[in-house]
Amino acid sequence: LASQEKDLDPFALVADDLDVVTQRIRDYVINEVPILSNAADYFFRAGVEGKRLRPTVLLLMASALSVVVPPGEVASAAFADNLRLRQQRIAEVTEMIHVASLLHDDVIDKATTRRGVGALNMVMGNKVAILAGDFLLARASIRLANLHNTEVVELLSTVIDHLVKGEVMQLTSSPESLLSFEHYTEKTFYKTASLFAHSLKAVAILGGHSAETVAHSYAYGNHLGLAFQLVDDVLDFTSSSGLLGKPALNDLQSGLATAPVLYAAEEFPALVPMIKRKFKNDGDVQQAELWVHKSQGIQRTRDLARYHCELAAASVHALPPAESERQEECRRALLQLTDKVLAEAR
Ligand code: FPP
Ligand code: MG
Ligand code: MG
């Protein structure tokens, strides 16, 4: 089994679905206004589409669960195909919401690069970048409403609400809250984990699954999302700009104290005033970086990410027994993704 898992590539397993999802997004964002089409399409073009982690996770979960045929329906290939189409739609809408949030985030952060190319705000200006984000959200809302499932609409709308909440928490934190690990964790849930958790819940709900299965799907997304962000926060200290496709040490430079710094402050209390003043005195960023590397901060953050990956894996193990080889394989891929997330943090 171990060698089997090594050969398993989660992204390859749903490669055909991913292509379908990406092509449909490209089709939806065509607009009578060419500048809007170009701008909205910018991060969906070949080579700039990113890892597509969110759609991959959603498609894998869809395939990891059995098809539940509701009373009154006939179990048929047509029923299964239609369900698949609806679950793919969640992947499409989720990726569109994610990219919309990145377009707005890059305006707020005055980012110059994203996914290894010029950020859209740099290429086309802030106004077009903001409108392109709004347009993506609008098109995503139409596609979502078309599913005629108000619970699912509520889930994905909650994601947008949380993205905004997380961003505002980050913009307006008081000096005291900047030191709080609880505040950091809450912000991380709103900014990153909520999207994984709620969209995975939507996939399980469309599939007609039990409350327990829906809860396991949500929990997998929540813990994977938290781990993913913790690893991202480690990479800000350990990776280079070239590898990241965006500037390294970006968090410190933006005044953000993430898990590695918060842990480091327990060993180097002189970090506390620096965190409170958002590293804005000369030399703060360099001194903070030094102390983070001298401390256990990076290791403790990796350990916390590992803990969340274990909880994500436990949610997969808690699903009702798989009923086909394909389901088994997709579950192994979901487990493998937790390992891949952790492996990135080295
Ligand atoms: C990236 O964070 C940003 C987010 C995860 C969310 C941004 C949310 C908004 C701008 C609110 C508006 C939301 C929508 C849906 C339009 P980062 O700056 O820490 O990461 P980065 O290094 O990738 O830029
Ligand atoms: Mg940013
Ligand atoms: Mg930001």
Image (cartoon, rainbow, N blue to C red):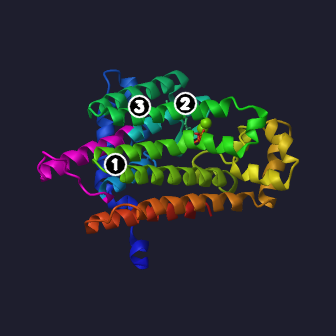
Q: Are marks 2 and 1 in contact (CB under 8 Å)?
A: no
Residue at horizontal 46 percent and vertical 39 percent from the top: 98
Residue 317 placement: quadrant? bottom left
Q: CA distance from mark 1 to mark 3?
A: 29 Å
Q: Amino acid at mark 2?
A: Val
Residue at horizontal 26 percent and vertical 57 percent from the top: 66
Residue at horizontal 32 percent and vertical 45 percent from the top: 205
Q: Nearer the viewer, mark 2 or mark 1?
A: 1
Q: Mark 1 — residue?
A: 204
Over which residues does the magenta segment extend?
64-93
Q: Which mark is residue 285?
A: none
Sequence order check, earlier mark of 1 and 3: 3
Q: CA distance from mark 2 to mark 1?
A: 25 Å
Say if residue 144 shows up in the picture: yes
Quarter of the figure that contains the N terminus: bottom left
Question: x, y (%) of residue 51?
Answer: 45, 51
Q: CA distance from mark 3 to mark 2?
A: 20 Å
Q: Amino acid at mark 3?
A: Ala
Say if residue 240 shows up in the picture: no
Q: Mark 2 — residue?
A: 164
Quarter containing ligand 1?
Answer: top right
**Dot 3 crowding, Cα within 10 Å, few <14, some 14–19, many 20+:** many
